[in-house]
Image: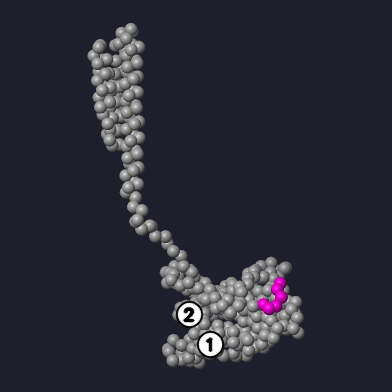
Amino acid sequence: MSDIFETIRRTQEAIEAIQPETAETLELFRIQYLGSKGEIKTLMEAMREIPNERKKEFGQQINALKQVAEEKFQAAKALIEAREEQSAAARFDLTAPGEPLPVGSRHPVAVTLNRIVDIFTRIGFSVADGPEIEDDWHNFTAMNTPEDHPARDMQDTFYVVDAQRMLLRTHTSPVQARVMENRKPPIRIIAPGRVYRNETISTRSHCQFHQVEGLYIDEGVSFADLKQTLLYFAQEMFGAPKIRLRPSFFPFTEPSAEMDIWLGTDTEKNYRLTKGTGWLEILGCGMVDPQVLENCGIDSSKYSGFAFGMGIERQTLRLYEIGDIRLVFENDVRFLRQFAAAL
Ligand code: PHE
């Protein structure tokens, strides 16, 4: 019987002498002393054989033993965990290169657009914006294309709310009207954006593309200003040495012209691109029709101006020598990735 007190004492000594250093030895310690089949549990079972007058003493000693074991366990656990944390921090190499993040890139159409905007902002044009869902007035009527005008057939579109004649804009020209209605000359704006046409039988079988509009209104703006501005653009954008203006028609400009740039025919590519003429059509332009100025509240006896508009995709194809326009609409990353370096 005194043996059991002796065993308790020795067990306590043993526990005090042990120092678990790893998670594994700590677990072995727990199983050996504190487990449901561990030594302390087994000692407690001896309670039955202890005479009543010593039961209290036995209980106290067992409890003390248990407490010593538990404290040892908690202290060792804290120590092991702290050590593990420290070595994890030491293993973490702050100088190691980070995980690479996939970097996106601008779409080639956006790159082209940015270049165009950049060229015009350098000579005093600022960027203007307008809604893609436009009303009939701004898209057509204010631009001198009243209802039943045959020129509307050239730009069929999608009507959103038929009763209110809301539609997807067919060109960026309505931004001209919106700017003129809200600002006083001098006006010098460039308006890039998305436009829509219902053209299933056209060579572009898609219904959405991008345009950039330009508008300059002031006193005494002449056709010479238009020519010089467009020549500057053609040189900056395409490195073209000269431009050609061919008479054309737009309801909102008078006179109207198409601008070609000179590429020449000395390379096979330029020969093919210009169909052997050396000239490539780039944009439509003209002097703003006085009626359009009046429609938008600008005194046409005092002010004059020029406007131009161009499709972006076509310029993108030329700049990057892309053979098929569908590629710029498909959003295939294998194609788009090639422009990652472009700004
Ligand atoms: N809005 C015309 C088009 O989409 C282009 C244009 C703009 C022509 C401005 C002249 C002046 O075809």
Image position, residue 324 (x, y; %): 47, 78
Residue drawn at the location 68% of the way across and 74% of the way down: 179
Q: In the figure, is residue 34 to the left or right of 252?
A: left
Disc 2 and disc 1 in contact, CB within 8 angstroms: no
Real-space Cα separation, disc 2 to disc 1, in angstroms: 13 Å
Q: Which mark is residue 319?
A: 2
- The residue segment tinted magenta is 182-187
Image: 27 above or below 207: above
Front-lying residue, 171 or 242: 242
Residue drawn at the location 48% of the way across and 80% of the way down: 319
Q: Which mark is residue 184?
A: none
On whether residue 174 falls in the magenta region, the answer is no
Q: In the figure, is residue 177 to the left or right of 319?
A: right
Residue drawn at the location 59% of the way across and 84% of the way down: 229
Q: Amino acid at mark 1?
A: Ile
Answer yes or no: disc 2 within 8 Å of ligand 1.
no
Image position, residue 165 (x, y; %): 71, 70
Front-lying residue, 204 or 245: 245
Mark 2 falls on what kind of element?
helix
Q: Amino acid at mark 2?
A: Leu
Toward which corner of the image does residue 295 lie, by quadrant?
bottom right
Image position, residue 167 (x, y; %): 66, 70
From the image, tell me which residue sits under label 1.
261
Image: 123 above or below 31: below
Q: In terms of sequence position, does the residue under pointer 2 or pointer 1 come before the other?
A: 1
Residue drawn at the location 32% of the way across and 24% of the way down: 68
Front-lying residue, 207 or 257: 257
Image: 265 above or below 29: below
Asked if residue 42 can be seen in this view, the reply is yes
